[in-house]
């Protein structure tokens, strides 16, 4: 059985199991897991990381970009 078909079968099994579930505490755990999994990664990074990303976006918007070949010349020894 291929992996995609197996995943689909597992999803169907989970849906069937969930539809018969009566334990409120398990349902709440599933709801909490869903909330955790759908959080935006932006909310989980530090202010320093956010500032760095925002600076990069501002630089890109201002046209302060280097070509790939220039980056390879600068950072080639680490690649």
Image (tube, rainbow, N blue to C red):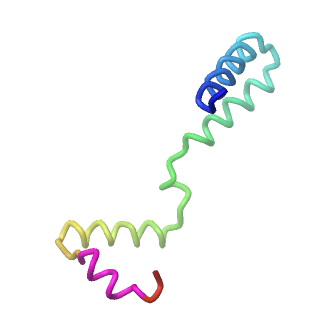
Rendering coords of residue 68 (x, y %): 28, 74
Rendering coords of residue 61 (x, y %): 20, 66
Name the residue rendered at 60%, 37% in the picture. Answer: 35
For this view, does 1 lie left or right of residue 23? left
Name the residue rendered at 18%, 71% in the picture. Answer: 62
Along the line of sight, which residue is nearer the eye, 16 or 37?
A: 16
Magenta residues? Answer: 66-76
Task: Find residue 72 and report its image quarter.
Answer: bottom left
| Residue 8 vertical position relative to residue 69 in the rendered view, above or below | above
Q: Is residue 11 magenta?
A: no
What secondary structure is the stretch in magenta mostly built from? helix
In the rendered view of the protein, which quadrant contains the N terminus?
top right
Name the residue rendered at 79%, 20% in the picture. Answer: 24
Rendering coords of residue 29 (x, y %): 74, 32
Rendering coords of residue 75 (x, y %): 39, 85
Task: Find residue 17 and report its image quarter.
Answer: top right
Residue at the extreme left of the image, as rendered: 63
| Residue 51 vertical position relative to residue 79 in the rendered view, above or below | above
């Amino acid at each position: 059985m291929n992996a995609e078909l197996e995943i689909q079968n597992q999803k169907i099994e989970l849906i069937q199991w969930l539809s018969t579930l009566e334990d409120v505490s398990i349902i709440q755990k599933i709801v909490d897991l869903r909330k955790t999994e759908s959080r935006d990664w932006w909310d989980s990074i530090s202010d320093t990381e956010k500032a760095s990303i925002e600076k990069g976006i501002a630089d890109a918007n201002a046209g302060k970009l280097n070509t790939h070949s220039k980056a390879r010349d600068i950072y080639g020894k680490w690649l």
